[in-house]
Image (tube, rainbow, N blue to C red):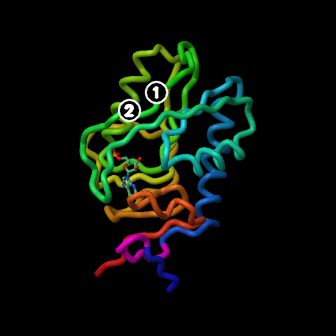
Amino acid sequence: MNYITVHDKTFQPFLSEGEIQEAISRIGTAISNDYADKTPLFIGVLNGAFMFCSDLLKSVDVPCEVTFVRLSSYNGMESTGEVRSVVSLQEDIAGRDVILVEDIVDTGLTMQKALANLGALNPSSIEIASLLVKPDCLQCELDIKYKGFEIPEKFVVGYGLDYDGLGRNFKDIYQLKQE
Ligand code: 5GP
């Protein structure tokens, strides 16, 4: 097995580049069908979703726009439960069809806060597209319309996801190895 080391931890292969791209292509097709007569505005949540957002847009074939916000709730491998907005939205989203693009939904608190904040700006619609979801960790009701994979409650890195800043550059996704 091709283990990787990030900081002090060892990770094992979990989702391959091929599996990831296949899931993204499926989501892109679904979005293209659902927004056939619309011009959605994708809002990528930095930093983790930058790679997913980039590949997702390439698989969408309706006219669309993209922008980014930066939210933060994680410290190392723990969700702090407190969501901070670090870079806020510059665009006017009133009347727009917004698709929030997230790398992973864990407790769901980040997306819940983002939905509340963006919802107050009167978009025409808001949906969530998340590459990964940890259903066992959800702490709130969240309707995630577009999701790539439901995964177990284990820390993952790669494909944009980091462990204390490192590991985002891997093409595949790796899971924390059992000690
Ligand atoms: P939530 O608010 O849903 O608990 O957390 C969402 C954020 O936590 C994600 O955007 C991501 O930054 C981080 N996160 C949650 N689980 C993981 C994980 O397994 N690996 C990494 N690298 N980040 C995670």
Residue with the mark numbered 2: 85
Residue with the mark numbered 1: 88
Crowding near the residue tagged with mark 2, few <14, some 14–19, many ≥20 C-alpha atoms within 10 Å: some
Q: Helix or strand or loop: what does disc 2 sit on?
A: strand
Q: Is residue 119 above or below residue 32?
A: above
Crowding near the residue tagged with mark 1, few <14, some 14–19, many ≥20 C-alpha atoms within 10 Å: few
Q: Is residue 83 left or right of residue 39?
A: left
- The amino acid type of the residue labelled 1 equals Ser
Q: Is residue 31 left or right of residue 167?
A: right
Q: Is residue 7 above or below residue 72?
A: below
Circle count:
2
Tell me residue 105's x, y (percent).
39, 48
- The amino acid type of the residue labelled 2 equals Ser
Tell me residue 6's x, y (percent).
43, 71
Q: Is residue 164 left or right of residue 81?
A: right
Quadrant assignment, res 8: bottom left
Spatial separation of the CA atoms under disc 1 and disc 2: 6 Å
Q: Is residue 150 above or below residue 38?
A: below
Q: Is residue 84 magenta?
A: no
Identify the residue at image location x=48%, y=77%: 4
Tell me residue 139's x, y (percent).
25, 44
Q: Main secondary structure of the magenta part?
A: strand
Q: Which residues are magenta?
A: 6-13
Q: Helix or strand or loop: what does disc 1 sit on?
A: loop
Which quadrant of the figure contains the C terminus?
Answer: bottom left
Mark 1 and mark 2 residues within 8 Å of each other at the beta carbon: yes
Tell me residue 19's x, y (percent).
60, 65
